[in-house]
Every structure is written in C-alpha cells, then in structure tokens.
Image: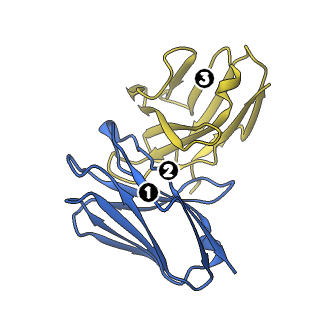
Amino acid sequence: NAGVMQNPRHLVRRRGQEARLRCSPMKGHSHVYWYRQLPEEGLKFMVYLQKENIIDESGMPKERFSAEFPKEGPSILRIQQVVRGDSAAYFCASSEGVDGPQHFGDGTRLSIL
Amino acid sequence: ILNVEQSPQSLHVQEGDSTNFTCSFPSSNFYALHWYRWETAKSPEALFVMTLNGDEKKKGRISATLNTKEGYSYLYIKGSQPEDSATYLCAPPGATNKLIFGTGTLLAVQP
C-alpha cells in the first residue's frame, strides 16, 4: 500500500520559469493538502483540495500559485514565474476523510537560482 | 487565527530517560489535535489524533494526553532511544481541516 508520492524530490528552476509539483495521494484518499516549509520556518498550510474542488486556498499566495486535483491523475501545485523567495520544501498530505490523520509525502525541495 | 505553542523548543536527554513536552492551543471551539513526529530528511509521521477531553493514546513507548478545557496536550516518551530523535509537532485543525502546526519540540537522544 504505497504512501503519498511526490515528485520530483528536488527541483531546480531559474527565476521566471514555471515549477510543477506533483502529488499522488494514498489509495482511497480523496482529500489532498499542500503545505510549505520556508527556510528556518515551520510547516504552513497552503491549499486543501477534494477531487476537482478547491475547498480552502487561504494559505496560498494570490498571484503565481495555483493548485488542482483532477478527477484522474495527481494533484498539481503550479508556481509561475518563480522568484528566489519561492525556494522551500513543499509537502503534500492526503486523508481518507476529514477527521482522520493526514499522511505526508517526502516533499519536493524547490530551489530557485 | 489559531495560536499553537509548544515547549520546550528543544530537549537533550540521555538514552533511557523518560521525557515529556507540551502543546498549548486555544480551548474554545476545540475539534481535534494531531501529533506528528518529523525526522530529519523524512516526511512528518502521524502519531495520534486526539478528540476527547481526558483522552489518552499510546503507541509503543509514546503516549499522549489531552485536556480540552484548559487547552493543552502532553506527549510522553518512556525510555528514550536514539531513534526517537526528531521534531515533535502538534497541530489542531483549523476551519476546513487544515492543520495549524506549532513550532515543534526538537528532541535529541544521546546514546
């Protein structure tokens, strides 16, 4: 029973490029959450999706960031025109329902040159 | 905005010592509290989800208690081992089940 799968594990982009981070939730999980850990900071919520719907995006910057969780395929966190301040570890988590634990992937370390 | 505090920030113990740390959270509108263990270079691992006042949960040598009326939870580790070295995070869910993480307690267990 595979856990939450994130890819790539490491991603390097130059300023102005686009970054796409993928997350496949655990089998049977329809709730996906994205969190970000900026350097020297803790985990901060970004967005919560439930199959094809964005439930809460209050933690996601209004510009350049978007997220989706299509009916088929992984959830995608997309960052357009990346800047140095986007360098962080991005973690995805999934849960079966709203009450249970959230299971985390290994994260994607994004570095902006 | 939920204010979650964990103490101490860091803790150094000897192998075999028992230890505990605290998570404080707003007691009003309490819904649940999650505990996670986060080892360096790995992903956060879910330990417990606690919901009821007075709840006590146990997983091996790790246990946790919950007081929703005064807004705190304790995590206990009995007979610490080097493999227990990690950051321990607590997180009450905010609205829509997003987790609001505390800053964590960094535990280092010396062999």
Depth order, front residue of A45/B73:
B73
User: Residue A59: percent from the left, percent from the top?
Assistant: 45, 29
Q: Which chain is blue?
A: B
Q: For this view, does A55 lie left or right of residue B78? A: left
Residue B111, located in which quarter of the rendered image? bottom right
Q: Chain of mark 1?
A: B
For disc 3, the neighbor class at 10 Å (few under 14, some 14 to 19, many from 20) is some
Q: Residue at x 57, y 52 (%)?
A: A3
For disc 2, the neighbor class at 10 Å (few under 14, some 14 to 19, many from 20) is many
Q: Chain of mark 2?
A: B
Residue at the spot of label 3:
A78
Residue at the spot of label 1:
B6
Task: Please state which amino acid type lies under the numbered disc 3.
Answer: Arg
User: Residue B59: percent from the left, percent from the top?
Assistant: 44, 74
Separation (CA) of disc 2 from disc 3:
27 Å
Residue at the spot of label 2:
B103
Q: Residue at x 44, y 45 (%)?
A: A29
Depth order, front residue of A64/A25:
A64
